[in-house]
Amino acid sequence: MMQFRDLKRQYEALKEEIDAGISEVISAASFISGEKVGELEERLAEYVGVKHCITCANGTDALTLALTAWGIGAGDCAFVPDFTFFASAETIAARGATPVFVDVDKVTFNMDAVKLERAIQSVLKEGRFTPRAIVAVDLFGLPANYAEIRRIAEKYGLLVLEDGAQGFGGEYAGRKACSFGDISTTSFFPAKPLGCYGDGGAIFTDDDEAAELLRSLRIHGKGKSKYDNVRIGFNSRLDTIQAAVLLAKFKAFAEYELDAVNRVAERYTERLKDIVVTPAIPQDYRSSWAQYCILLDTEQQRDDLALYLKQKGIPTMVYYPKTMSEQQAFAGGAGASQELEISTWLCKTILALPMHPYLTDQEIDHVASQIEDFLSLPEHS
Ligand SMILES: *Cc1c(COP(=O)(O)O)cnc(C)c1O
């Protein structure tokens, strides 16, 4: 049986460095805020091209810490894609603010800038909430349309929070993902483009004041020391063992894994572009391929293909089966949202194929051939 994201194969390739890093942490017995955490933060800030990287416990906390640093809460609203992972919107609501869902673009699956501006105008006209921020998501590894999003943010005086949980390693206009927000965040959940061996996350910013505040918030609102508490905060640190895993994995990620997933994507697209809708990467963008998703004609065809591939030992996933506006958790608690038809349609027709840097050409060709075979069956063509 093929793996959807083969973390065991990655471990086999990097075992020596990962094991050595973990052993060092155990020998030094500095499990919390050890040296490796600071080393990782320096490396990642340099790679992304921003002044500050602040690691934390997970990608959800990274979003919460950012929203907290900006004082976003009751009476405020933030604009977030209708088609994303729950945490992008959950964190807004958890702060007591209101998420306003915006439809996505049918080609990039990222926030539609035209619909974003219309949503902002309708919230302003309604006057129930104070618009504060745009939470832009780099879905499946592709950075959002930051030229337009930044232009709109400036026009309406909004902050940009880049949810780069899936985007780490992506690029747009010569800049790296996690550098596009006033604050940007990522996740090191094991299956993300850069994953650790548990939960982990990070926050990126050029803003010195925000960085200082975030460093305080993640450790119980500390002031000069851990036992000088100047505000109410959180306990949200990255374990030193996870930093050691990430240091080893980051080297491979930057040196060859990112190139490898791009080669996998190219080969899939070459094989599949004439029979299904394949992902399109606009000019000036690079994806880190958190997911490789194709679109089928109908929900029935998508579900039949997923079952067909499963029977052939090929795992697939549906990201995402439900839009944010359809989630029960937001029933009645979301701002006026209109025009969400692309998000709704994607939930019915999208299918994610096995994707990771260690897929062989043979495996890619096998998946593609099985999809070809399925679509050539008379009842599916
Ligand atoms: C995974 C993910 C998160 C949350 O990250 P965790 O580390 O699992 O908390 C947030 N936003 C998006 C878009 C994600 O894919």
Image (cartoon, rainbow, N blue to C red):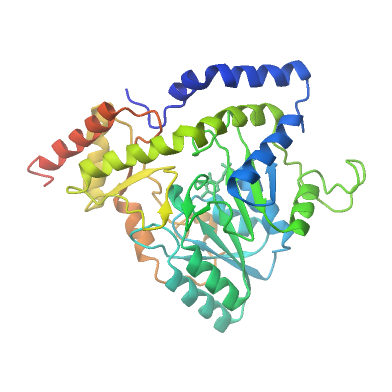
Foreground pick, 362 / 109: 362
Residue 63 at x, y = what percent?
63, 52
In the drawing, does residue 137 fall left or right of residue 39?
Answer: left
Quick one: which residue is furthest to the left in this view?
378
Determine the quadrant in which ligand 1 lies: top right
Q: Residue at x 25, y 46 (%)?
A: 302
37 versus 18 height, above or below: below
Q: Position of residue 190 (x, y in %)?
A: 53, 33
Give the answer, above or below, for where 131 lies relative to 42: below
Q: Is residue 89 visible?
A: yes
Q: Is residue 57 visible?
A: no
Give percent across and percent down for residue 222.
86, 47
Q: Position of residue 335 (x, y in %)?
A: 54, 69
Residue drawn at point x = 64 percent, y = 30 percent = 242
Quadrant occupied by the N terminus:
top left
Query: Could you tell me which residue is drawn at 23 percent across and 40 percent down?
Result: 305
